[in-house]
């Protein structure tokens, strides 16, 4: 199939400035810019400012001053809430532009930006929701322990300066999941978006700047993780780092923060299971699992349920339907409304995903659909991978244990509820699991037995008001809901005699 140019789509959006925001000023990067290469055509479409340690130092200094001496942390909640609501309104007004920037960021198909969690409504709702939390964070009072002992109460105070580091796959939503609660809590921020999808985050920075927050409250530095991310994590003036990304980088950040007793929250990868019982709605299970793995971001989703565990009597049926669903993926210009699937974010990542498929076959898996080859109907350029259904997979194989972050599903049969649960939990990760059954007792029993931060019963979703986080190697802490704002607050206990 002939290729096309993504350059022609640059007019469909207002590009943000190729600058970084420090202390209310937009400044150039000192290092060589990072080329933002679009994954559908491999064209460089934007120069991401190359932030360095000095820029990080300046941003952290500004955030420190804004926290220690500025009005933000001490501002009456009613007033701080107004800023967050202003940001929410600005995001909604910019929805079409943000949608186009998202497709330019990481090739999210325009057809999918209408999904709640992909578009502008979700981040706008996060800012609104956290504006509403500001006056609802209350402490506790305690009865006297003994006669003549002091009266005791607790209050919650902002953690301080926070470094927020995000990945490329859902850049606007994931940045908003951190910035909204951090600002609501009264923290000041240095944000570091992924250099691989900078546009929506820079635009969000512009919208926040236009909301006229006091200088230094919100700063944004772009550039390579090794230049900017490491400088941010190692700056002792940063009280907390909240990171979303890979387990490998999350581990490095946790070590570095741990060494200086810095606070850290981690939202990492997964190898999530979907358990499909014979009495479940098979069509729904297939649509949820394959929709996430093969369409939209093509499995480049942390909560992709990449292990489909199926009760044996319906195994062949489920495999057949997954294979059929793989054919629904179509490729090309993400702005074309008939395009349903995205390429891998980089050539290196495409090669990694294909390498996983090849290794699985060497390890004994059989390919029921796809395989390590370019999908039929894909344009000549771009990092497209075939939607792949693997059978004859043992859960101990690398393909069933390692996060692949691509359109690859392992389908594994089980014979009993206990065996299904055992296989589901046989992973180092614990992010998002799903159970498909019409038996309510079983749904609750199996859901309780799964070691995962989130369990969907006959569904899977992510919402602003409900906590989301991982257990085991999938992370520390949670985002969204009350749990999300508590990550940016410390507890103080006061004793009054
Ligand atoms: P990544 O870890 O490579 O990068 C994430 C961010 O960290 C980027 O901004 C990057 O520049 C920065 N970074 C890189 N090296 C750094 C260092 N040494 N110190 C500090 N910062 C550094 O991840 P990615 O490839 O951008 O994203 C994919 C990963 O993110 C997958 O593992 C996926 O599961 C995970 N993810 C998790 C969630 C969740 O909510 N649990 C959501 C989305 C993505």
Image: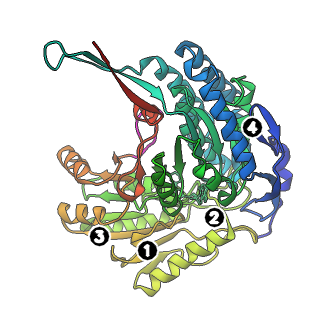
- In the image, is 463 to the left or to the right of 318? right
**Location of residue 265 in the rendering, given as x and y in whole percent from the top left corner:** 46, 46
Q: Which segment is the magenta one?
A: 460-467
Mark carried by residue 344 = 2
The disc, 2 or 4, on the residue closer to the chain's N-terminal end is 4
Q: Nearer the viewer, residue 175 or 307?
A: 175
What is the C-alpha distance between the residues marked 1 and 2? 17 Å
Name which residue lies at 65% across and 26% down. Answer: 87
Q: Which residue is mark 4?
A: 22
The disc, 1 or 2, on the residue closer to the chain's N-terminal end is 2
Name which residue lies at 59% across and 14% down. Answer: 79
Helix, strand or loop under label 3: strand
Q: Nearer the viewer, mark 4 or mark 3?
A: 4
Q: Are marks 4 and 3 in contact (CB under 8 Å)?
A: no
Report if residue 464 lies within the magenta region: yes
Q: Nearer the viewer, residue 452 or 56?
A: 56
**Location of residue 484 in the rendering, given as x and y in whole percent from the top left corner:** 45, 35
Q: Nearer the viewer, mark 1 or mark 3?
A: 1
Q: Residues within 10 Å of mark 2 (few under 14, many from 20)?
A: many
What is the C-alpha distance between the residues marked 2 and 4? 32 Å
What is the C-alpha distance between the residues marked 2 and 3? 29 Å
Helix, strand or loop under label 2: loop
Q: Are marks 1 and 4 in contact (CB under 8 Å)?
A: no
Q: Which residue is mark 3?
A: 413
Q: Which residue is mark 1?
A: 399
């Amino acid at each position: 199939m002939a290729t096309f140019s993504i350059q022609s789509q640059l007019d469909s959006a207002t590009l943000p400035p190729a600058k970084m925001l420090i202390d209310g000023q937009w400044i150039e990067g000192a290092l060589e810019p990072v080329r933002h290469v679009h994954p559908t055509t491999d064209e460089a479409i934007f120069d991401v400012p190359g932030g360095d340690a000095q820029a990080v130092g300046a941003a952290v200094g500004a955030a420190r001053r804004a926290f220690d001496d500025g009005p933000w942390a001490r501002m009456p909640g009613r007033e701080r809430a107004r800023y967050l609501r202003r940001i929410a309104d600005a995001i909604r007004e910019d929805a079409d532009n943000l949608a186009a920037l998202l497709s330019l960021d990481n090739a999210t198909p325009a057809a999918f930006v209408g999904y709640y969690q992909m578009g502008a409504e979700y981040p706008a709702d996060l800012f609104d929701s956290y504006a509403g939390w500001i006056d609802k964070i209350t402490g506790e009072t305690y009865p006297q322990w003994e006669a003549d002992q002091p009266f005791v109460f607790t209050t919650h105070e902002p953690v301080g300066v926070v470094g927020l580091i995000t990945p490329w796959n859902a850049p606007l939503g994931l940045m908003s999941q951190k910035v909204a609660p951090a600002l609501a809590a009264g923290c000041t921020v240095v944000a570091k978006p992924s250099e691989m999808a900078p546009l929506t985050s820079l635009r969000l920075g512009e919208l926040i700047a236009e909301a006229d927050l006091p200088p230094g409250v919100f700063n944004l530095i772009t550039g390579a993780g090794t230049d900017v991310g490491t400088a941010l994590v190692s700056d002792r003036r940063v009280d907390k780092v909240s990171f979303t990304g890979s387990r490998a980088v999350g581990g490095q950040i946790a070590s570095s923060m741990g060494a200086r007793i810095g606070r850290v929250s981690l939202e990492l990868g997964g190898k999530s299971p979907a358990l499909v019982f014979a009495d479940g709605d098979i069509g729904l299970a297939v649509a949820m699992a394959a929709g996430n793995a093969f369409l939209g971001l093509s499995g480049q989703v942390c909560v992709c349920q990449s292990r489909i565990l199926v009760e044996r009597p319906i195994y062949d049926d489920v495999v057949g339907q997954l294979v059929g669903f793989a054919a629904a993926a179509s490729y090309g210009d993400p702005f074309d409304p008939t395009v349903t699937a995205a390429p891998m974010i980089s050539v290196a990542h495409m090669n990694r995903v294909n390498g996983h498929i090849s290794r699985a076959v060497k390890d004994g898996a059989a390919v029921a659909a796809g395989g390590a080859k370019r999908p039929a109907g894909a344009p000549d350029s771009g990092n497209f991978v075939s939607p792949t259904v693997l059978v004859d997979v043992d859960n101990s194989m690398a393909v069933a244990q390692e996060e692949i972050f691509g359109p690859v599903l392992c389908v594994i049969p089980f014979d009993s509820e206990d065996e299904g649960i055992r296989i589901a939990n046989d992973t180092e990760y614990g992010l998002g699991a799903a159970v498909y059954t019409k038996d309510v007792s079983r749904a609750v029993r199996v859901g309780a037995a799964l070691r995962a931060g989130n369990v969907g019963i006959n569904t899977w979703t992510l919402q602003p008001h409900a906590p989301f986080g991982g257990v085991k190697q999938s992370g520390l802490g949670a985002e969204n809901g009350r749990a999300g704002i508590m990550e940016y607050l410390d507890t103080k206990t006061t004793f009054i005699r």
